[in-house]
Image (spheres, rainbow, N blue to C red):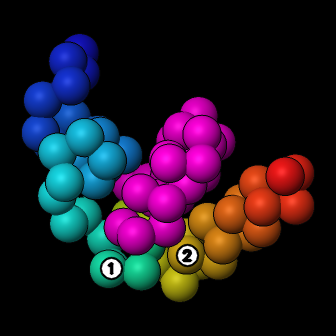
Amino acid sequence: MPNGKPGDSPYTDVVTHGRDVYSPEVDDLIRELDSMGAAIDVHDVLSEHEPDPDEDALAADLRELKRAYESDD
């Protein structure tokens, strides 16, 4: 069972532990969305793309999520 340690989750690895998991663009989008309060939605997007994500598709989904959060302001 995951307990928040490095390697438990790509999301916590990027956000909590500051690790580089994906491409720099994807990692930056994850961190930016986290700072916007989108943690649950980001986690859902990452889960949809596991276990072997196509990083271009993942980046596109994260950019779409970011646009949705920006338009809600």
Q: What is the secondary structure assignment of the residue under circle 1?
A: loop
**Residue 13 appears in the rendering:** yes
Residue at 12% over, 29% down: 5
Front residue of 48/33: it is 33
Residue placed at 87% from the left, 51% from the top?
72
Q: In x, y percent, where is residue 52?
A: 38, 64
Res. 26 image quadrant: bottom left
Disc 2 residue type?
A: Ala
Which residue occupies the foreground of this view, 48 or 41? Answer: 41
Residue 3 spot, x, y in % from top left: 20, 18
In reply to whether residue 49 is colored magenta, the answer given is yes
Residue beneath disc 2: 59
Q: CA distance from mark 2 to mark 1?
A: 9 Å
Indicate which disc residue 23 carries.
1
In the image, which disc is placed on residue 10? none
Residue drawn 19% across and 54% down? 18
Counting residues from the start of the chain, the first of labels 2 and 1 encountered is 1
User: Residue 34 in magenta?
Assistant: yes
Question: Which of the two residues, 5 or 28, is positioned nearer the viewer here?
Answer: 28
- Is there a contact, CB below 8 Å, between mark 2 and mark 1? yes
The answer to whether residue 47 of the structure is visible from this angle is: no
User: Compared to 43, does 5 lie above or below?
Assistant: above
The quarter of the displayed image where residue 59 is located: bottom right
Please provide the residue range marked out in magenta. 27-51
